[in-house]
Amino acid sequence: MNAKLERKLSLLHATAINMIDMVGIGPFVVLSVVAQIMGGPYFLYAWIAGAFLSYVDAMVWSQLGAALPRAGGSFHFLKEGYGKKWGQMMSFLFVWQTMIQAPLVIASAAIGFSQYANYFFHLSFIQEKAVSGAVVILVISLLYRKIESIGKISVFLWVGVLGTMAWIIFGGIAHGNFLEPIKHINDGIELKHGFAAALGFASVKTIYSYLGYYNVCHLGGEIKNPSKNIPRSMFISITGIAILYLAMNISVASVLPFQTIVESKYVVSAYIQALYGPNAGAIVTVLILLVAFASLFAATLGYSRIPYAAAQDKSFFSFFAKVHPTLHFPHRSLLVLGAIAFVFSLLFRLKEVIDAILAMRILIQFIGQAIGLLLLFKRKGKSFFPWKMPLYPLPLILAILIWIFIFISTGQKMMIGGLVVISLGLIVFFIAKKMKWIGEEATKVADIEAN
């Protein structure tokens, strides 16, 4: 009898996994970039915009995740949403782009880790790449175990993330000027086309820092009471992270001059050093590296379930369908994604990876998924969904419009790259269908997995 996934992750575990995935290295390395793009104290609006889109998009994920709580998340959402005619193609395209963009996400955290480690070691380019590759290998080795152990590790890392953010924020509050950036948030702002364009470019970076609120959906087959815990964990995660991000940015801006924020490569470390001295700067840098590692851990965990779920459904290559016979996790999927991420961590730079991640996934995963929800709602009716978004379908339509704006803001090069990946996926899909490498009719996942 083939081993199956087990529902062992609680609301606490799910929230911890989401939040450590969301924080990562992102907010620490893009803080300066966002300030530079916006060009003034109103750079805080880019972080507010990222939180707003996350809330709106989480309503789409919540409605789908609560109704279809299975390993692989978006794979099942797209397949069910687009039905018999287009479902298998859309779900295949999602898994296809996941095989590229998931390793990019993992690589981005590893590259960010190695770059921030320069605060201590002044690494050469080759040494940076060696560190990023080693971090990927370490994460894969930690994830090679039972899911209940993963849940405990996630909570431990989550406590580290919250503790680090709390220290950073406390420094700004204790300094006494915490409210100054808020008072001056509109200084120099001009609501013209240039501001809208800058907000779009900056939001690409802030949204990257919020990504991961939906990680629980990829682990849907391992969540207890999924119809309640999946939506709850997402909204708790986004609320908590939005508060932490805004408070952290306000704290830094209340201590460091704007020009220092723009120019510093290690802005949070420089901020703590300005408050408490060099030793404290070194300690917070170590903690930031821990946060980056925690995010890498959570992202790799969630993504490893996607090729497995698709292969189980006979909609992707059968090689990925196996669960480890004793540890009960999709080990082949984990190892392949880890191997690709290892290569990407050696080949690319962080700035290229951030834009590529968003451009590649927006059309299929975010916009495609929202449209799929509209189709599924029309076909199945309101009663099919145990969780229902308020004011349906207005948040869904708003999410689509904002994602289109963000896609354009990634730039022409990245937009073309995303379209090329989709085109190649279509070619592979039709070849796989013709060669019968994937099922002629994608089979339904057993009801026992959903329950």
Image (cartoon, rainbow, N blue to C red):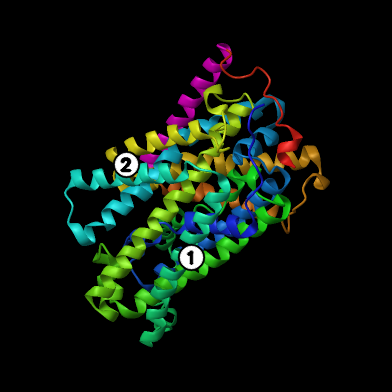
**Badge 2: residue crowd in 10 Å (few <14, some 14–19, many ≥20):** many
Residue plotted at (28% across, 80% down): 276
Residue located farthest toward the bottom when viewing the structure as drawn:
176
Give the magenta range: 412-435
Cα distance between the residues tagged 2 and 1:
27 Å
- Name above or below for residue 404 compared with residue 328: below
- Name above or below for residue 76 compared with residue 42: above
**Amino acid type shown at disc 2:** Ser
Dot 1: what SS? helix
**Amino acid type shown at disc 1:** Val
In front of the other: 180 or 265: 265
Q: How many marks?
A: 2
Q: Place residue 36 in its image quadrant.
A: bottom left
| Residue on which the image places disc 2 | 345
Q: Which mark is in front, 2 or 1?
A: 1
Residue plotted at (42% across, 79% down): 170
Q: Is 376 in the magenta?
A: no
Q: Position of residue 29 (x, y in %)?
A: 33, 59
Q: Is residue 105 visible?
A: no
Q: Position of residue 228 (x, y in %)?
A: 72, 55
| Residue on which the image places disc 1 | 159
Q: Is 416 in the magenta?
A: yes
Q: Position of residue 328 (x, y in %)?
A: 58, 37
Could you tell me what secondary structure mostly forms the magenta stretch?
A: helix
Dot 2: what SS? helix
Quarter of the picture holding the N terminus: top right
Q: Position of residue 6 (x, y in %)?
A: 65, 42
**Badge 1: residue crowd in 10 Å (few <14, some 14–19, many ≥20):** few
